[in-house]
Image (cartoon, helix red, strand yellow):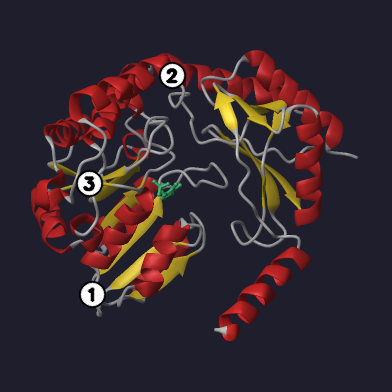
Amino acid sequence: MPHFKQRIQQALSERKAQGLYRQCTSLSRSQQVVDCQGSSFVNFSSNDYLGLAQDPELVAAWQQGLSLYGAGSGASPLVTGFHTAHHELEAQLTDWLGYERALLFSSGFSANQAVLFTLLEKDDVLIQDKLNHASLMEAGMLSPATMRRFAHNDTAALHRTFQRSEASSLVVTEGVFSMDGDLSPLAEIKSLCTRYGSWLVVDDAHGCGVLGEQGKGSCEHAGVKADILIVTFGKAFGLQGAAVLCSEDTADYLVQFARHFIYSTAMPPAQAYTLSKACSMIQQGGWRREKLLELSELLSERVESGIDLRATSTPIKPLIIGGSEKAVAVSLALKERGLWVSAIRPPTVPVNSARLRITLTAAHSRADVEKLATGINEVIHD
Ligand SMILES: *Cc1c(COP(=O)(O)O)cnc(C)c1O
């Protein structure tokens, strides 16, 4: 197939010429330090906001889960892959987050796709915030519904979109936007949805565990209830997987018709067991959320004014640089100082808004954050 070979080579060389070529780096790590090719770095580029991924209690829970349940689930959930550990995790999530049902998925990507593909039909209108995650955008483009996107967090634009959409609509937004760390105006969005008879779906990948009472997330923080809430376990939970929180009927419907649920192996029961532990640690982990606030304040105090470090109420602190090459250069300069802060470039973020996506975690120390602030102040002007 020489045609494909040529296409691949051309796409790769274009990426390199644009300064947008990306690669995985293999790391080993303990706590918030990553080791790479003989050097260690303080990691400011994870989504492990509460520092649970390396927490000894959680690691011990997974080991215990393995002893109790074995390695894999052995099948898809409707065959024989659904175990008591999955059932208990679902019950814990519904109690905590206040829904009738929770349905587990292997990843947030598949949960998002399952919800949109299963719910939407040809005559529906799907309304999304322009900065929604790639999994939501892609599902929208592939679904038979008409997709309309509104300017980021712009409720007036959302209102206009409702006014020109006659068909029944579904509004989808993130609770916290991953590249900007800002919150969606959920209360206003919810009231527009109510007014226009639309359902609201909130993907709270970056809010659950971090915001709201007991870490219940963006919706609790904003005082609203989404019709469907998607929480993912790869961020504050420190693990992997996702859940869709919804009504009894909606869950039943997904179980019958969501291909990502039906035709995919259930997550290992040991993982579900560990997620239950993570869920309890999140609820009891008020001190972790307080520590994040404290580190957040420290960072904004110490970074010189005039540097475009966005003030956010989440652990995501974008430092906007602009050009991709400059962003990569700043990231490399920080690496020389033992600080790992990845540059995020288009197409992940809009053109000319390449940035360092700094994330704080409850496992960082004040000294780590001070070192980061000093590093930024020193390298940004070079
Ligand atoms: C990370 C993320 C996802 C995907 O979740 P995975 O479990 O990593 O597949 C979905 N939505 C948002 C907003 C995310 O940040």
The N terminus appears in which quarter of the rendering?
Answer: bottom right
Who comes first in sequence, dot 1 or dot 2?
2
Tell which of 239 and 72 is nearer to you. 72
User: What's under tag 3, amino acid-wise?
Assistant: Ala
**Residue 146 percent coordinates (x, y):** 35, 77
User: What's under tag 1, amino acid-wise?
Assistant: Glu
SS at mark 2? loop
- Please identify the quarter of the rendering in which residue 305 is found: top right
Where does label 1 land, which residue? Answer: 121
SS at mark 1? loop
User: What's under tag 2, amino acid-wise?
Assistant: Asp
**Residue at the (73%, 70%) spot, across then down:** 13
Mark 3 surroundings: few (<14), some (14-19) or many (≥20) residues within 10 A: many
Q: CA distance from mark 1 to mark 2?
A: 43 Å
Mark 2 surroundings: few (<14), some (14-19) or many (≥20) residues within 10 A: some
Q: Are marks 3 and 2 in contact (CB under 8 Å)?
A: no
Where does label 2 land, which residue? Answer: 55
Q: Is residue 306 left or right of residue 276?
A: right
**Residue 52 percent coordinates (x, y):** 43, 24
Q: CA distance from mark 3 to mark 1?
A: 27 Å
Q: Residue furthest right?
A: 382
**Residue at the (40%, 73%) spot, across then down:** 141
**Residue at the (63%, 43%) spot, across then down:** 25
Who comes first in sequence, dot 3 or dot 1?
1
Where does label 3 land, which residue? Answer: 266
